[in-house]
Image: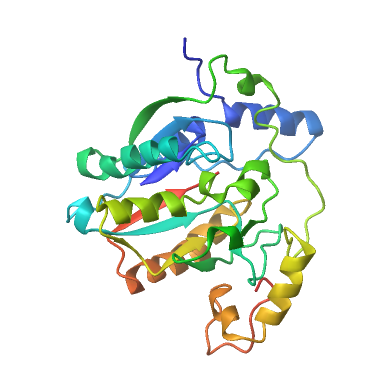
Amino acid sequence: MAEAPVEYIASITRQYARLGYKPYGWVYNTDTPPWQPVKKPLAQSRVALIASGGIYRRGQVAFHFKDDTSFRLIPTEVRTEDLRTAHFAYDQTDARREPNVVFPIDTLRGLVHEGFIGALTEHAFTFMGGIYSARRVREDLAPALTSRLVAERADLALLVPV
Amino acid sequence: MTMSSALDITRAVNPPRAVFTDFPLGHTAGKPFDRRLQRQIMIEALSAFETMGQPGSIKMLPFEWDADHSWKHAGAGKGDTRQARTEEPQYQTEEDKAAAQEGRLAEECIVCSNWSPGSEAPRSTG
């Protein structure tokens, strides 16, 4: 018998109250989301992977934990063993053993090889999702990522939060 | 398309397209080393691009982490531990830190962040 999903908002709200923190400012978007129709079959589409699990490549500067709105460009040809993580808000044990759980690069490369999707963009895009300012995400990070998606001619964006 | 393992947060954010897998945080794309499951989840996620027609749709995937759901009662949603946060990069290993410091001098750093050739130097974040 399936159990209901964990209620993270309620749980974290209770925890903050217990610890005497200011309530967290959850984002509630109540308007109908923007909609872009899919224009090509998957097998002809170029897919961009965007992941918020703090993934970086060995040799790159790691993320910091104070509202870091920077992002990394990870070549999609990257060696999986060169992937690292830096994030404070989830258990990174499995991500560090096997990055595909939060950064499914081998999974996607396999599906390109099978012909299920057409291609990947030259880079995947990663950031550290523990950013407390929704405004900075909206005004800084999201537009910068969007312009990269356009520059790399992505047909589809696949977001992988943690 | 956004993948998700936090249904209530995804509902609140309300992205155009989402697929939900009821796994512990940090496993949005599957279980470690289970390539077959990772592939199945990804095929379900990508297929939804072709089948979803309504903005705000969330496709519920049937995969279960374990039979007894004990992970849901083992400190799930612990969330913020309020360690002091600084702008110091938090490397996974000391070796990564050394590699990044070499990288700063090379072209490698162009891909560190949204740094562009026109700016004076990479920001402190890289």
Foreground residue among A87 and B103: B103
Residue A19 as seen in the image, left or right of residue A152:
right
| Residue B106 vertical placement versus B1 (above, below) | below
Residue A43 as seen in the image, left or right of residue B21:
left
Residue shown at 73%/78% (left/top)?
A: B101
Residue shown at 54%/39% (left/top)?
A: B27
Name the spot of residue A142 as percent of width and height, x first.
46, 61
Residue sticking out furthest to the top: A1
Q: How is the image coloured?
A: rainbow
| Residue B62 vertical placement versus A50 (above, below) | above
Foreground residue among B76 and A15: B76
Name the spot of residue B57 as percent of width and height, x first.
31, 35
State whether residue A57 appears in this view. Answer: yes
Foreground residue among A72 and A105: A105
| Residue A138 vertical placement versus A72 (above, below) | above
State whether residue A90 appears in this view. Answer: no
